[in-house]
Amino acid sequence: DLIKGNSQQGTLRKLINIPTTTPTSQWWIDSISLTDIALNTSGSYINSRNPKIDPSKDEIALFASQIGVNADDLTFKVVNPNVTLPDKDAPKINAIRISFVKTEAIYTISPSAVTTNEGAVLTNTVTTTNVATGTKLYYALSGTGITTADVTAGALTGEGVTDSTGKFSFSHTLANDLSTEGAESLEIKLFSDSSRLTQVGTTASVSIADTSINPFNLDIDGDGKVTALGDGLMVIRKLFGAAFAGDALTNKAISPTATRTTAEIHQFIESGISAGTLDVDKDGKTTALGDGLMVIRHLFGAAFAGAALTNKAISPDSPYFGPPANFAAVAANIDAMRPV
């Protein structure tokens, strides 16, 4: 004990170390018991940190055990300038009573919308309570069918640091992917570790409406016309696969007035394949030398009228397979893909 003043009146200090790893809590010095050589005692109450509330029964050892440290490692400083004892011998602090209430950290993720559309900007605000300013937290976006292709701005994982109000925000722009996927559920989770193993708070969910659905039609490049050596050729090339990857798909086939890029044309034709629209003979498969060939034949017009449309192209698994093949049904399926 350090004493300033004289034996009649002085200032006493007691130093005990509190590690910086102490969890968020309310604690305060409830009382100090002083003893002099004549065993006279005096109690003094100090409110040194946090608003004082109803005292608990915690002693130093119990306080230490509750916050997971050794009692010798506790740290705080007691200053009592109003102690007056009449004895000549300096008083000593023989007990310090500490009241302690551990407060739970709270984490909340608030999306800017619980239902949103493709192409929209989604902002998520993280709000914390009883979390220190400057705490780094880690987020992750996931969900069935959710990939990096579903966002055009913002990564699926990231981190943020709490400000003086315990908050931080992050935003993503949702992609207009022109794919028919139906509504998707996006989940946003928050973690206390960079490995994203320890989740804090509850998962927030956002429903993404499939508003970028663009019904497939045979105007592949979006120039307002449907041609055999333009749109038809790009369809059959796409069905051949890797041989026409990248710009090979549109080379000398895309219209100079096209409104879609090569990448968008790849995606657009793929949407017609995925939806089954380009399966014109309805055999459950979409092939280059079957469906693709019949599409381009029909776009050539009268040269492939009647049975010439399906000759050696229709699948034996097709419900339209003959003899004679129901070429009219195949033609109707192709015509149904013409833009209105």
Image (tube, rainbow, N blue to C red):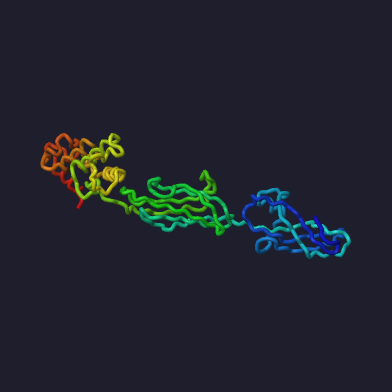
Relative to residue 292, is residue 5 depicted above or below? Answer: below
Relative to residue 77, is residue 296 depicted above or below? Answer: above
**Residue 272 picture location, percent across and down:** 26, 45
Residue sitting nearer the eye, 89 or 41: 89
Residue at point 71%, 55% (across, down): 76
Quarter assignment of residue 298: top left
**Residue 42 picture location, percent across and down:** 80, 63
Residue at point 66%, 49% (across, down): 68
Q: Left of 327 or right of it: where is 28?
A: right
Q: Quadrant of the N terminus?
A: bottom right
Q: Left of 157 or right of it: where is 44?
A: right
Farthest residue, direction right: 88
Residue at point 48%, 55% (across, down): 169
**Residue 282 picture location, percent across and down:** 21, 42
Residue at point 65%, 61% (across, down): 50
Quarter assignment of residue 24: bottom right
* Residue 138 in view here: yes
* Residue 285 in view here: no
Q: Left of 95 or right of it: where is 125?
A: left
